[in-house]
Amino acid sequence: MEKIHAVFNSKFNYLHDIKISPLSRGYTFSDSVYEVIPFYNSKIIAFEKHISRLKKSCSSLNIPINIEKTTNEILELISTSNLRDGYVYYQVSRGVDLIRSHMFDNKISTETFGYVVEYIFKTQTLKVMLCEDLRWQRCDIKSTSLLGNIMSMNNAKDKGCDEVIMHRDNILTEGGASNMFFADDKTIFTPEISTNILPGITRDLLINEIKKAGMKVEEGNYSIDDLVDAKSIWLTSSTKGLAQVIEIFNYDVSLERDHHLFLKCKKIFSEKFFK
């Protein structure tokens, strides 16, 4: 069995040797947040942005975090792994209760956990399904409360799909584990950040780079009907990069494979972060 480097409450070990209490609030209530920090060719991608978002997620749930210690642990995981390409998963939960209780004790100690694995970053094409957004109303917090995502994504998997595009009352939000973009012949569109949408790091990096390149990108509220004129749709995340949607299982839309705006965005992004 492959030995995966991990850390639990600041103690480094192998993943299979770490034991976590069943009374951890991360286990009983999903009272926890997380980050996925990618690195390519031994270079961490947007590290400060990931750390900032983790700190913000903790603050939103009033979970104390020693951000300096967390930063050092993530860096050490990458260093000791000797991997060139991969990602760190890092989770912060409120801590362990004496007995399960909705009301937490303010004196419990924050619980931290992380591991590092190899990951091959490769071009992906996706078949997706449109579905109602079932998630809680604070999707801007990167919490481990992902049951709505899981239900929708596995329902889509049963229909031969790779991902979902979610909507709330017909207003597009995001993918199950990604942000979404779509384009006509001249303009790139993406749903604007709100409490219904996670501020994706890859999303932010892409918007900044394509604006620098002089391309037209608009953030706003878009409905399912706005996809009728879409020539290209793609999803972004720390592990997907830019993944082209080639089919929507339950919606009639004519998509051009390798549309010129998608290819230009992919080229700009790859040259900036994957060289």
Image: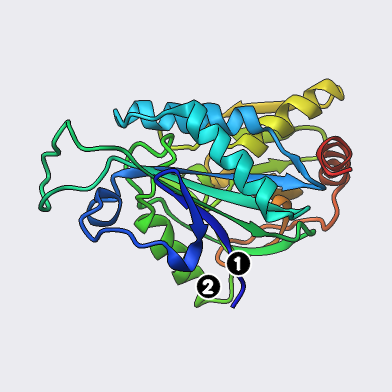
Mark 1–mark 2 Cα distance, whole angstroms, equals: 6 Å
Left or right: where does residue 14 sit relative to residue 61?
Answer: right
| Residue 270 visible | yes
* Amino acid type for the residue under numbered disc 1: Asp
Q: Quadrant of residue 210?
A: top right
Q: Are the residues flagged by discs 1 and 2 in contact, CB closer than 8 Å?
A: yes
Q: Is residue 231 above or below residue 208?
A: below
**Residue depicted at 53% across the width and 45% down the height:** 174
Left or right: where does residue 231 sit relative to residue 1?
Answer: right
Left or right: where does residue 180 sit relative to residue 245?
Answer: left
**Residue depicted at 23% across the width and 51% down the height:** 29
Q: Secondary structure at mark 1?
A: loop
Q: Secondary structure at mark 2?
A: helix
| Residue 192 visible | no
| Residue 62 tag number | none
Q: Going from the N terminus, do you reach mark 1 or mark 2 first? A: 2
Residue 9 x %, y %: 39, 45
Question: Nearest the camera: 25 or 143?
Answer: 25
Residue 102 x %, y %: 12, 45
Q: Quadrant of residue 2?
A: bottom right
Quarter of the image for the N terminus: give it: bottom right
Q: Which residue position is annotated with label 1? A: 162
Q: Which residue position is annotated with label 2? A: 157
